[in-house]
Amino acid sequence: MPLDTSTTYPLTKLRLDGRRWNELRLIQAQISTNPASSGSSYLAMGNTTILCSVHGPAEGRRGDATGGSAGGSGAVVEVDVNIAGFASVDRKRRAGGSDRQSGRIASTLRSAFQSHLHTYLYPHSTISIHVSVLSADGSLLAAAVNACTLALVDAGIPMPGLLCGCTSGMSGSASTPRDPLNDFLDPLLDVSLPEEQELPFLTVATTTSIPTGADEDDDDMKVAMLTMDSKVHHTYIETMLAVGVDGCKQIREILDGVIKGSSRR
Amino acid sequence: MTDRRRINGPPGGTRPPVFASSIKPTTVAAERPQRQRQPNELRKIFLKTGLIPSASGSSYLEFEPSASLSAARASPQSVIPPSSSLKLACTVHGPKPLARSATFSPNLVLTTHVKYAPFAARQRKGHIRDASERDLGVHLETALRGAIVAERWPKSGLDITITVLEAEDDRWWADAPDSHDAAWGMMNVLAGCITAASAAIADARIDCLDLVAGGVAAVVADETAERGVSAPRLMLDTDPADHRSTLSACVVAYMPARDEITELWLKGDISKASVGIDDKNLTHEALIDGAVDAARGAHSVLAEAVRESAERFAGLSSGKST
Amino acid sequence: MAAQRQASSASQTPHISPAELSYIYTSLSLPGAPIRPDGRSATQFRPLSAETDILPGTNGSARVGFADGTQAIVGVKAEVERTALGIEALTQAEQEEYAAETGGNSKSDGVKQGSSSGQGSWVQMAIEIPGFRDDDALPVFLAEMMREPLVESVAGGGEGGMVGGLKGRLVINRRWHWRLYIDVLLLSQPLSYPLPLLSLTTHLALLSTKLPKLKSKGEEDPFFDDDWDAAEYLYPRAKSTSTKPSSIPGSISVHKVRPPVTLLVVSVAENVIFDPSREEIAVADAVLAISVTHDTDSGRLKLLSIRTIDPPSRLTQPGVPNSENVATLGSTAAAEESVIINPSTGEEEVPGVWRPRRGGVKRATIAKMVKMVLEKGGVGEEVLEGLEGVEVG
């Protein structure tokens, strides 16, 4: 690929899609999109489009390993991620059921929301979340977290705060120690698919405790999920994390607006 | 689903290399199998029950090889046989109690499982059932469920397993797939499965409303020497390898005593064919009626096989008492 | 909302009591004028909302939502692939060479046609239903059921038509072809048998499908126009192809050939009912999926495939008549429950007591169901006309 971020970014300070380092992609979201489910949402971050629907809390299916008695102390969260065959540029030939990527997203979401939601309110029940990825263009996990949060809010399932996810990367391979005098690498907010494929990135999701009004400040922000599977020198982690957490804050405001806007109708 | 546990053969069929220079247009065409039967004449069916002692009911079904196939077997001209004939074995296990975790069912739960042997057709089949085999399983289940008196066995299951040892191909091996290409061989296999499963169920002494027999009819176009592709005609019990192209085909599962159809599967576009000369003959209704006629034929064989099974059972029980 | 939750988590086998089943069956089997639970007429469809071209990353896409909230999304993707040559094509090449050498013209139309028509395996279909693995029986059966009529339809030639149907349209030249992937996503667990929803969505998605314009000619390796505006519809449209290369917004473009639709038809006693809901399909005597399309030559509808679907009524729980019920024994006079013969099934029945359906379907019933779909001004035409009202592209 002749036009990649790592070669053009140092010259132009603009990313492939024309964003600056600290800009999010356009986020469009909607809740209550699917009347057949308890809660549902649609979320588009740039070209990544996700539909999410929540069923429950409901009684677990009989004969199911997780249903019935297993969730004795609280609700069990089930997550099912389906990346559509037409989601990426080339049609993916999937070998039966689910592939590794969707399986990993599903297990990450499950553990994130299992601990995040107030599941103790619903003993012996199951909350099942179904995520369909209609088009994939990077930051899938972060977008899925945001879509799930919206759908769970729509379903009226109590949680301490909105769980918002965001990705951040570095504009180069960042494999050597950071030189504070000659720092030419910029962190990048909300990476897209081509950036994801060539640059190191991490996905972070944060939550806040219940907003108490005016005296809201950064101290009660908690990181609920953090995943990274690319190699980067440890000196860069702090920068990436700071940018990612800041992105989560921006996304929280957007999601907040979506929820408030739709409840007015 | 891919099979990762075994070393699999090539996904496509295998063909011996044919060099373009060695083909003479006449030699290939001469080997084309031709249908020797009348349009309404069925192939002979061999059907025997009770061959597998470990199962509660079983049957084995075989179609008579076509004239060209038996000729080719007697004196092989080529490594590739001109056509194939259906051979399948069916086992029935049950009625047996459902698994403890299964939900309550007031009726007998039927499970059907159709599997081609890897060597059954020219196209090699994997060890894991593919979409067409699962599709056949659903068709067979529909056909049988209508016949079985299911409420006499609550909370029980019945497993029907069919192994297809030799299947019919979708077309003659040397034909390029034409505009009417589809899985026609599957329909003959389904008809055989229905007849064999019905015999095996009767052999397992499961109560049925009637014996259900499968039959196939098709609208086919043949290649004749004088004027290319001939006008489409309706034929019963077609072997796809015998014909240049199959326009439309229909399988029914039919219960003669009640004059009812439990399963109907018709596909193909015969709108072009029916515009032809003998207009009245080639409608979907004629096709269904043809398939029903074929099923009636299969039913006579089925009844005979079931009678044999009953006699054997009567002999067994009287033998025990003395 | 609570009722909806319950319904969506229930499996395919309906949980309806024998008394309810019997009530629904009786009202649906009223001679001539069935009373449906939702007040529709026998041939009326449920309202739906539809939109097309919703996913920019696909060649064509559509979303259809039923009023009960179930939604489906279909995305169509196309890839260029090399065609495996059969022995006839080789023979033909040989013959042509021979003809060129000797200067004679040897032509055999049958062989010619054989190589220019496509193969059914070039169209692949996958259905994703939440709660089902994609190799479960239901998704596989549905996918085969919808793929079959698509590749079966052999449309007549004619101007602007598709020679050889969809399969013929996929042929680029003798060595290359398009492979079409149709991915169907059902967004929630189905409330009723999802076939009509999936079929309509697939129909609209295929209508909106575009393939890049071919720039290479003849037997060259295919080479396409980069301009997406110049792309051609998979199912060609009459207006836009005849007058101007780019279609003017607002102009009505008429499809000459349209993909088939599959209709779900059930019979209850003497009545034939279309687009059954969950409750109606639970009591049906017979369920048929009938695929039809427009015949371009005669302007009538033509039949492409019929499949019987296992009616769930065979799996229902039977009701117990008072005469056999230990709890009510003696409280009712036995004479009250006169046994009647059901005219459609020919079985003895006590009125108001549900029996699971047994047996098959009469040939006359099948013929009646097919006729109602196919006849001029029948339900099939009505559905296709309704779909033409959806603005595509």
Image: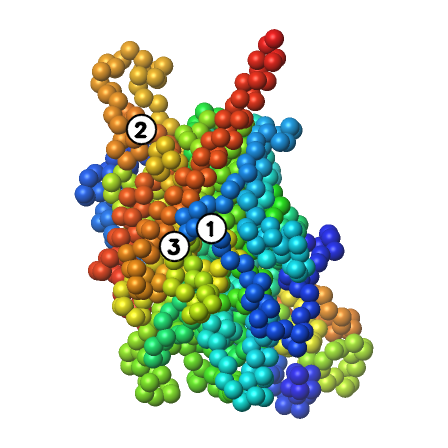
Question: To which chain does the residue with label 3 belong?
Answer: B
Q: Which residue is tagged 3?
A: B234
The residue closer to the viewer here, C343 or C105, is C105
Label ID, residue C347: 2
- Amino acid type at circle 3 is Leu
Give the chain of mark 1: B
Numbered disc 3: secondary structure: strand
Q: Quadrant of residue B20?
A: bottom right
**Nearer the observer, C332 or C382:** C382
- Helix, strand or loop at label 1? It is loop
Residue drawn at x 57%, y 48% is B65
Residue A244 can be seen in this image? yes
Letter of the chain that mark 2 sits on in the rendering: C
Q: Name which residue lies at 59% across and 67% down.
A: B28
**Element type where label 2 sits in the image:** loop
Dot 2 amino acid type:
Glu
